[in-house]
Image (cartoon, rainbow, N blue to C red):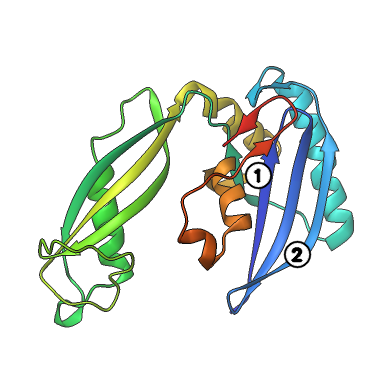
């Protein structure tokens, strides 16, 4: 089954938009553009109107390339004042014959984040460290298909101040874009360079940007 995804990154110098088609676990770029913008300093919005004008210009360019209007997107969120913390959650395995399914994993991750984020912060990412079946000492990265009665997980959650993300969400709304998900830009950098070999090593991915460096 084919799926079309749009990603939008609002940087201090450029707004970047890419449209990809996902087919059989492969990504195919359909269109991409970048437009210069002002109104952003070190990742944070300082002039919403300037950013909206640049975003609309970029969306217009994409429409001219593809002949369709982009209305939904995944966006990047600035990691200024980001907090990372380790927490845990658990959920009863409800799959047929107590076989772990994606639904069980989602329930477990939701339990790990419930009441863990303060009202003045926004949850951006949840990264599992390991899953455990029925309290087993040894954890696994992907428990789907395993059997047991209780699934637990240790996860890293990333949050940012709500005041950092609200202006971006308002800009997207005014530009006619529905935000379906958001991620840290550093997460995108990692997955762009990710390989099985890199996953087995400890190191860093460094992005030297216009006015910030992200690691």
For label 2, the SS is strand
Residue at (28%, 70%) from the top-left corner? 143
**Of the residues under marks 1 and 2, which one precedes in the sequence?**
2
Residue at (10%, 69%) from the top-left corner? 149
- Looking at this view, name the residue that lies furthest to the bottom: 97
Tag nearer the camera, 1 or 2: 2
Q: Is residue 118 left or right of residue 212?
A: left
Residue 176 in view: no
Crowding near the residue tagged with mark 1, few <14, some 14–19, many ≥20 C-alpha atoms within 10 Å: some
Q: Quadrant of the N terminus?
A: bottom right
Q: Quadrant of the C terminus?
A: top right
The quadrant holding residue 212 is top right
Q: Which mark is residue 177?
A: 1
- Looking at this view, name the residue that lies furthest to the top: 46
Q: Which mark is residue 29?
A: 2
Q: Observer-nearest residue: 113 or 200?
A: 200
Residue 112 in view: yes
Q: Which mark is residue 140?
A: none
């Amino acid at each position: 089954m084919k799926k079309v995804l749009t990603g939008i990154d609002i940087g201090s110098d450029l707004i970047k938009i890419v449209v990809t088609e996902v087919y059989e676990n492969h990504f195919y770029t359909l269109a991409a553009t970048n437009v210069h913008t002002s109104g952003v300093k070190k990742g944070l919005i300082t002039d919403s109107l300037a950013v909206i004008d640049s975003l609309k210009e970029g969306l217009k360019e994409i429409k001219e390339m593809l002949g369709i209007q982009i209305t939904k997107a995944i966006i990047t969120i600035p990691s200024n004042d980001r907090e990372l913390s380790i927490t845990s959650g658990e959920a009863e395995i409800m799959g047929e014959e107590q076989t772990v399914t994606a639904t069980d994993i989602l329930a477990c991750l939701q339990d790990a984040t419930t009441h863990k984020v303060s009202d003045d912060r926004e949850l951006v990412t949840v990264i599992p460290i390991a899953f455990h079946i029925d309290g087993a000492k040894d954890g696994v990265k992907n428990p789907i298909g395993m059997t047991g009665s209780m699934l637990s997980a240790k996860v890293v959650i990333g949050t940012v101040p709500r005041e950092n993300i609200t202006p971006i969400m308002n800009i997207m709304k005014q530009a006619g874009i529905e935000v379906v998900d958001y991620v840290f830009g550093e997460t995108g950098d990692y997955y762009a360079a990710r390989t099985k070999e890199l996953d087995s090593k400890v190191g860093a991915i460094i992005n030297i940007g216009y006015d910030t460096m992200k690691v």
